[in-house]
Amino acid sequence: MGLEQFIQEAISPWMKDEGPDSDIVMSSRIRLARNLEKIPFPLVAEEEKLKEVIDEVEKDFNEQSFEQYQDFELIKMESLKALEKRILVEKHLISPHLADKTKQGAVLISNSEQVSIMVNEEDHFRVQLYLPGFQLEKALEEAFKIDDWLEEKIDFAFDEEQGYLTTCPTNVGTGMRASVMMHLPALAITRKINRMIPAINQLGLVVRGLYGEGSEAIGNIFQISNQVTLGRSEDDIIDDLKSVVHKLIEQERYARELLLQESEIELENRIFRSYGVLRYSRLIESKETAQCLSDVQLGIDLGMIKDISKSILNELMVLTQPAFLQQYAKKTLHPQERDVFRASLIRERLKLED
C-alpha cells in the first residue's frame, strides 16, 4: 500500500459501502484542527520548525497501525509531482491549500483512505475522517479515537477557557468542522435550493461546492458544514447540522416526487438525454460530465435507469476530473485533448456495463 494505490484507484475503499440515506447523503466527514503546544502555528513558523513537526510524525506514526484503519502512510508534499498532488485533492485526501505547499507539508493516509491527517496545512494537524451516507455521530466517535491516538504522543495547544487553539478564529474551541456531501438534483432543477442556501447560512451553517471553500456546486453536489465552534460543544454542532440535513433530505425527496407528478415526461427526457450524451459524446468537458452524471444518478434513484450501477457513476465522477484523467492517460493533455479522452473513457466504462 502507499502512494501508488492512492493515485491509481479512483474509488476509495470506504466509498464502496452504502450508509443511511446514501441516495442523497453521499458522505459524512469530521475534521479536527489541532496544533502543537510548543511550536508556532504553520503560517508564522520557520521552515526548520515545520520540519520538526514532520520528523516527529514520521517517527511516531508512519507505517503504524491503528484499529480497523490498519497502516498509515506518510506522504511528503515535496516528494510529489504537481499532477499527483491534484489527484489527492480530487480524491479529497488533501486540501488545495496543502497541495500548494512545496516544502514541509505532508499527509498521513490510512490504507482504507477513510482517514487522512494533513500535517502543516493551516494548522499543524488536520484530522479528517469519512463515512458513507448520513453517519455524523459515528464519524465523530471514530474521529475522537484518532485524536486520542495522536494525543498519546503529542501535546496539543489547549486553553481551559477557549478550548483547542487554531490558526483560524472560527475553528477555536472544539476545532471541529462537521460536514456532509449531499446530492440535491431535484432541489437544483426546481431552483428551490437557491432560496434555501441563505436560510441555511443564517443558521450558522455554510453551503459550499464539492471541493469546499471557494468551490462551485458542480453536479448538484453540495457540502453543508458548521462554521463556528467557539463556545459550542461537539454534540451541539452535530445536532444543529443533523437537523438541517434531515430537512434537506425531506425537501429533496418531496421535490423528486413533485417532479414525477407534475413533469414526469420532461424529467425522463432530461435524464435520458444526459444518458445519451455520456454514452455517445466524442467530446465533453468536466462540468457537463458532472451535470450528466447527476441526471443519470437521479434516474437510477427514481428507477428510470436500471442497467447501470451507482458504483460506475461514482468512479466516473473521480476518473473524469482533470488530474485523474491525465494519470489514466499516462500523459499531459491539453484542455480539448482532455475533453476527447474524457468522452472516450466514459463510453468505454458504460459499454462494460452492458
Image (cartoon, grey):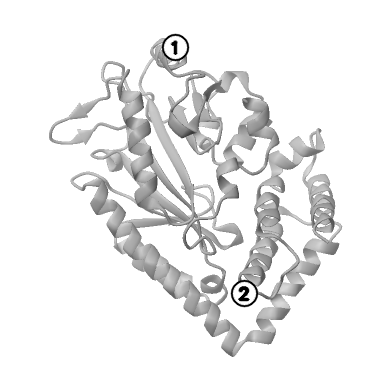
The residue at 47%/70% (across/down) is 193
Secondary structure at numbered mark 2: loop
Marks 2 and 1 sit apart, C-alpha to C-alpha, by: 51 Å
Residue position for label 1: 59
* Residue at the far front in the pictured view: 67
Residue position for label 2: 302
Residue 321 against residue 304 in the figure, above or below: above
Q: Would you say residue 34 is visible in this rendering? A: no
Precedes in sequence: disc 2 or disc 1: 1
Secondary structure at numbered mark 1: helix
Residue 23 against residue 328 in the figure, above or below: below
Closer to the camera in the image, 142 or 226: 142
In the picture, measured across the screen, residue 238 lies left or right of residue 299, that is left
Residue 220 tag number: none
Closer to the camera in the image, 74 or 82: 74
The spot of residue 192 in percent (x, y) is 47, 75
In the picture, measured across the screen, residue 2 lies left or right of residue 334, that is left
> Disc 2, disc 1: CB below 8 Å?
no
The residue at 57%/82% (across/down) is 259
The spot of residue 315 in percent (x, y) is 68, 49
The spot of residue 201 in percent (x, y) is 35, 61
Q: Quadrant of the C terminus?
A: bottom right
